[in-house]
Amino acid sequence: MLKLDLHVHSSYSNRHGHLECFNNVEVIRQATKKTGINALSITDHDTLSYNKLKPKLKSLFLLPGVEISTKQGHLLAYGIKEPIKPKLDVFEAVARVREQNGLVIVPHPFSFKGLAFRTAKLKPDAVEIFNSINFSTLDKLSEYYVKNNNLKACSGSDSHFPLTIGATYVEVNCEPKVDEVIEHLRKGRFKIKIIRRAGLIDKLRWAGFALFGAKKLFLREDSLLINHEK
Ligand SMILES: [Zn+2]
Ligand SMILES: [Zn+2]
């Protein structure tokens, strides 16, 4: 059984001159061991880090993924090999993912950089109704929207800091092979498991680290990470 967190960022997300993600390879290894997660998609912002991370995370099944910054908001794509440029119109970005036979998921539709009421028109394979760093009321709104529009629901931790890796995952009962996992996800053959939502304290520590780099003040020993991937 694969326990797959579909939406995790690594330090490869820190490419555009800002530090926002504290999950380096060692932290990802430790956190997944602790939570029993055996599969991840590292969906870094506008970069396919799969090929760089795969040899470093051999004990985990990795599903190739990326979070694309489209003109209108964030879009998750899975199973693609060619990168997709940021800032495209979202409908064009979806078409490019489909050309590569990739899977399309709309993350956090009603939060910052969410695709909101365009979501259904994009005909995604699934929509996040639980995002561990989102506000619960916004996730409730996503859940309501998904039901009303007959869309499929999924979840993702959207982890940018160690404590949230595996805060939610989907259970997929298939072989750890990219094509099989994609097919199961496409057909909705998975179960959503929710463990926890990041609390205010988690977010303050994350923000504190991001703003001041005050590791010792804001991060406990068990969640610290030092060597950022270049
Ligand atoms: Zn996002
Ligand atoms: Zn994200």
Image (cartoon, rainbow, N blue to C red):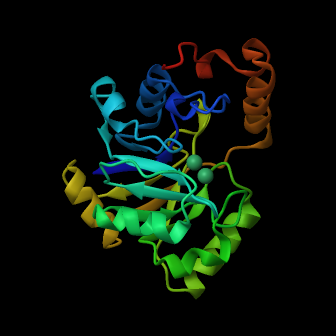
Q: Is residue 190 visible?
A: no
Q: Is residue 58 visible?
A: yes
- Residue 224 relative to residue 121: left or right: right
Q: As rendered, which of 67 and 167 lies closer to the eye?
A: 67
Residue pictured at 55% horizontal, 86% vertical: 149
Residue pictured at 58% horizontal, 30% vertical: 14
Residue 172 location (% of width, % of height) = 31, 58
Q: Quadrant location of residue 102?
A: bottom left
Q: As rendered, which of 33 and 182 lies closer to the eye?
A: 182
Vertical arrangement, residue 31 with respect to residue 203, above or below: above
Q: Quadrant location of residue 185?
A: bottom left
- Residue 127 relative to residue 208: left or right: left
- Residue 37 relative to residue 54: left or right: right
Q: How many marks?
A: 0
Vertical arrangement, residue 176 with respect to residue 51, above or below: below
Residue 130 location (% of width, % of height) = 59, 60
Q: As rendered, which of 170 and 19 lies closer to the eye?
A: 19
Q: Quadrant location of residue 109?
A: bottom right
- Residue 129 relative to residue 31: left or right: right
Residue pictured at 49% horizontal, 30% vertical: 31
Residue 173 location (% of width, % of height) = 26, 58
Residue pictured at 39% horizontal, 49% vertical: 4
Residue 103 location (% of width, % of height) = 36, 63
Vertical arrangement, residue 216 with respect to residue 87, above or below: above
